[in-house]
Image (tube, rainbow, N blue to C red):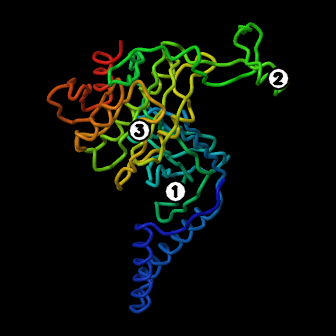
């Protein structure tokens, strides 16, 4: 049980106190015993109320939140279980939980001794980020609601609201810019070394990296990129003035979905924000994966829009085969097209509340528009992925 957070009279209790003082004063001045008796009765009722809430009542409060990581717009709730462990005293109470800095109230019925009440509080998941809970506060009321006491329970709990990962289906074939400006389809395997790992039984002995094995004293196997795996770079425009409403939330969903598709396709990827606050490259995993790296998903969940101009990040470093710029309808389109046109496959995805068309093209760049992440991912599947 938590410590007392505040013992006070309710509005009804304050009114009773004023009436008691007035009756005692008026009765004493007029020598009217009836008024004095009524004033004494109200004063005794107030005293009983204060004693009633001041005496600790064995109440146990437990809060559970599931899940602790949840995609944006998914259902999530906190379950609060309150039990009156007293053997003789009923409890009348209400309470509130602090969720993201705001108080969410909940009501409880009158708990008889031994009774348990369970309440579910919905967790708002419209926006990404960390949502903190607690401490939970229980308001216990006394006789005739003349007084109340606030008691706090438990510690804080944190829920991480992550961007949604939608099925973008796949990536286009890998290409790179030729020396004369033409797009050339080439294989990014064979000599395209992405990393080294220790030898495991069953590995192809022809892939042993003998120089590193001799230096470390253990067999090391080279990891090469899949010859058909394109290199994807996603540029997320994180300027707040590029978006209307919750447009940035939809843009992050698109970025997470494309990076997850690259991971499922065993393709290397990179996601970078225009402000430079986020720049993460993901190599081809050694084993099969089911989606985006949880650590990267967590960083995307905590990415916030900025108010300053972009830093001019080196968007084409690493020679991406596919460059996708994700932005909002309020951003100037020409610079975005210029950035995307520098890659063999350039795509600009615009979160537009009222698009004239979902798929278009300009300067050799595919332009996708849609009000929601679902619309942009659907346009990607139909116009880009194959």
Query: For mark 1, does the 10 Å Cα neighbourhood hold few (<14), some (14 to 19), or many (20 or more) residues?
Result: many
Q: Is residue 194 left or right of residue 241?
A: right
- Between residue 40 and residue 161, name the one nearer to us: 161
Q: Earlier in the sequence, mark 1 or mark 3?
A: 1
Q: Position of residue 149 (x, y in %)?
A: 55, 62
* The quadrant where residue 114 appears: top right
Q: Earlier in the sequence, mark 2 or mark 1?
A: 1
Per the image, the residue denoted by label 1 is 139
Q: Position of residue 368 (x, y in %)?
A: 26, 27
Query: For mark 3, does the 10 Å Cα neighbourhood hold few (<14), some (14 to 19), or many (20 or more) residues?
Result: many
* The quadrant where residue 138 appears: bottom right
Q: Residue at the spot x=40%, y=14% of the render?
A: 185
**Disc 1 versus disc 3: distance between alpha carbons?**
55 Å
Per the image, the residue denoted by label 3 is 315
- Between residue 380 and residue 67, name the one nearer to us: 380
Q: Earlier in the sequence, mark 2 or mark 3?
A: 2
Count of labels in the image = 3
Q: Residue at the spot x=28%, y=37% of the render?
A: 338
Q: Is residue 213 left or right of residue 122?
A: right
Per the image, the residue denoted by label 2 is 214
**Disc 2 versus disc 1: distance between alpha carbons?**
70 Å
Let me know if residue 345 appears in the view. yes
- Between residue 78 and residue 282, name the one nearer to us: 282
Eyeballing the image, is 188 above or below 29?
Answer: above
- Residue reaching furthest to the left: 356
Q: Position of residue 190 (x, y in %)?
A: 58, 14
């Amino acid at each position: 049980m938590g410590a007392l957070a505040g013992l006070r009279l309710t509005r009804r209790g304050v009114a009773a106190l004023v009436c008691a003082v007035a009756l005692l004063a008026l009765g004493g001045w007029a020598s009217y015993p009836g008024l004095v008796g009524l004033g004494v009765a109200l004063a005794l009722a107030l005293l009983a109320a204060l004693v009633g809430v001041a005496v600790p009542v064995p109440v146990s409060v437990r809060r559970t939140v599931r899940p602790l990581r949840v995609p944006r717009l998914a259902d999530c709730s906190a379950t609060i279980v309150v039990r009156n462990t007293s053997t003789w005293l009923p409890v009348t109470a209400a309470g509130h939980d602090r969720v993201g800095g705001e108080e969410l109230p909940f009501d409880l019925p009158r708990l008889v001794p031994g009774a348990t009440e369970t309440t579910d509080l919905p967790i708002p998941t419209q926006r990404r980020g960390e949502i903190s809970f607690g401490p939970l506060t229980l308001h216990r009321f006394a006789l005739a609601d003349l007084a109340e006491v606030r008691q706090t329970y438990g510690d804080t709990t944190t829920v991480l609201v992550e961007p949604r990962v939608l099925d973008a289906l796949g990536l286009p074939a890998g290409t790179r810019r030729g020396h004369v400006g033409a797009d050339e389809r080439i294989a990014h395997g064979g000599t395209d070394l992405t990393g080294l790992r220790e030898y495991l039984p069953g590995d192809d002995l022809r892939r042993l990296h003998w120089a590193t094995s001799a230096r470390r004293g253990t067999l090391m196997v080279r990891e090469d990129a899949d010859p058909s795996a394109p290199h994807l770079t996603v540029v997320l425009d994180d300027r707040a003035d590029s978006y209307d409403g919750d447009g940035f939330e939809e843009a992050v969903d698109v970025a997470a979905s494309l990076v997850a598709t690259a991971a499922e396709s065993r393709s290397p990827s990179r996601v970078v924000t225009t402000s430079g606050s986020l720049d993460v490259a993901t190599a081809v995993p050694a084993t099969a994966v089911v989606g985006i790296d949880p650590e990267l998903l967590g960083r995307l969940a905590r990415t916030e829009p900025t108010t300053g101009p972009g830093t001019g990040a080196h968007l084409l470093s690493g020679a991406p085969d596919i460059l996708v710029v994700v932005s909002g309808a309020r951003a100037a389109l020409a610079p975005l097209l210029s950035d995307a046109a520098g890659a063999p496959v350039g795509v600009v995805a615009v979160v537009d509340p009222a698009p004239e068309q979902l798929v278009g093209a300009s300067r050799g760049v595919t332009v996708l528009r849609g009000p929601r992440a679902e619309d942009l991912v659907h346009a990607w599947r139909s116009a880009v992925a194959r």
